[in-house]
Structures are given as structure tokens and as C-alpha cells.
Image (cartoon, grey):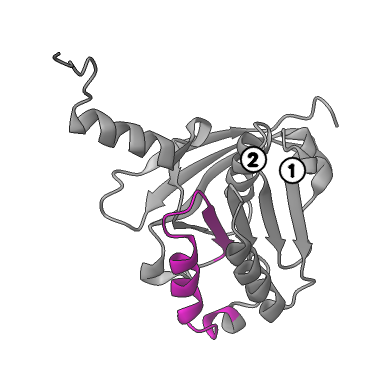
Amino acid sequence: MRATLSLVKPLSHLKEEQRTLDEISLESFGLSLIRGTVSEIAGPASTGKMSVAIALLAQLTSVGETCAVVDSVNGFDPVTAKLAGVELSNLLWVRCSGDIEKSFMAADYLLQAKGFGAMWLNLCGLPVNKLRAVPRTYWFRYRTRIKDTPTLMLVTSNEFLTGSASQQSFVFKRERAEWSGHGNFKLLDSLHTRIVSRKRFFGPPIEAFIKADYTDV
């Protein structure tokens, strides 16, 4: 009796499937973030960093994945997040009230717990001099904790902090903003952002267009 293997996938196809499973594609920004790694987005205020983080949470929580936010300065707005598509019942929100030590400890505990699709550590608004004093060992500890897990750790800050511990590191630069209205009654209509990777292998800069939607406000 002879048995025949009816389906053999080439190694290249298997690698492609694994890559697809490991990546979270944020098509509106032209970015793909990798699970099991630390990804960092840095840049000034109003450059689109929060929009990317919210889009990530919306994409994952809407399909049932549990995510977490370590909110260092209590800047996370659940109402805005819900309007953007975040399923709040699948989101753990940790408020740290400006305490840097609590922020880093909370991130550490969450990564140890595992089971999260994404964990967003938002450090925007914290004193830069204090963030620079945080030992680099924290970042390498985070990288070790999530290696070979389905968790993506996203770090947002005003300047780069993670060094070589991050798999992906991007800087967001605002090219221009467009407003509607007159005088003191203006609303942000759209934001044009330039996304540049600090890792050479990522590719050329990306031009992202972020459109504000006030339909449900």
C-alpha cells in the first residue's frame, strides 16, 4: 500500500504564512507592527502617534482580542477610543497619574501576565529628563518577556527611549495640518504626517494622511 502526501507547502509559503500571522497591518498608516516585539513611535505632540495606537487597539479589540493601556499621565480618553472603534470591554486601562515608576512596573506586570494582543505604554507628557534616567535594562526585560508570544508592545513618547531593544522604531513628523472654521471656532480637519523609520531595513519614509471624523461627537 502506497501513501501519497497530497499537499506539501513550499518553505517559502510557510514562511509567508508565519510572517502574516505575526504582523498586524495598519493599512491607513502604511505600517505593519510585529507581534512578540517592542515597537516605538516618537515625535512631538499632534503628529498622529495617538491615532496609530487607537487604530491598533480598535483593530484588535473589535475581533475579540484583549489589549491593555498603561496610561502614564491619564491622557487616554475612552470616549474618543470608543468612537474610533475600540471595544472597551476588551480593554484593560491602567492609570498611573504621572508616576514613572508605576508606569514601568505596570507594563512589566502586564507583560508577565501574558494573554494580551497588544500592550500600549504611553509615556507622552512625562518629563524627558526623568525618562532618560530609566535604566535601559527595563526595555530589554520587556523584549525578553514578549519574545515568541502573540503580544505586541507599543511605546509612544516624545523622544526615542528604547534603543536597540525595539524591533521597530518610527519618528512621526507633522508636515501640515488643515483646519475648518474661523477664528476661535476651528476644528482639526486633517493631518499630514511623515513617518520615518530609524531601522534601516524598514524602507523609505511614509506619507500618512489622517482625517478627523466628528460624525458621532
Boundaries of the magenta span = 131-158
Residue 159 in view here: yes
| Crowd tier of the residue under label 1, counting other residues whose Cα lies within 10 Å: few below 14, some 14–19, many 20 or above | some
Q: Are marks 2 and 1 in contact (CB under 8 Å)?
A: yes
Residue at left offset 79%, top offset 30%: 214
Residue 3 x, y percent position in the rendering: 18, 16
Residue 98 x, y percent position in the rendering: 75, 74
- Identify whether 163 is placed above or below 41: below
Residue at left offset 73%, top offset 29%: 213
Which secondary structure lies at badge 1? Answer: helix
Q: Amino acid at mark 1?
A: Asn
The residue tagged 2 is 65
Residue 149 within the magenta-colored segment of the rendering: yes
Residue 195 x, y percent position in the rendering: 43, 47
The residue tagged 1 is 90
- Identify whether 90 is placed above or below 142: above
Which secondary structure lies at badge 2? Answer: loop
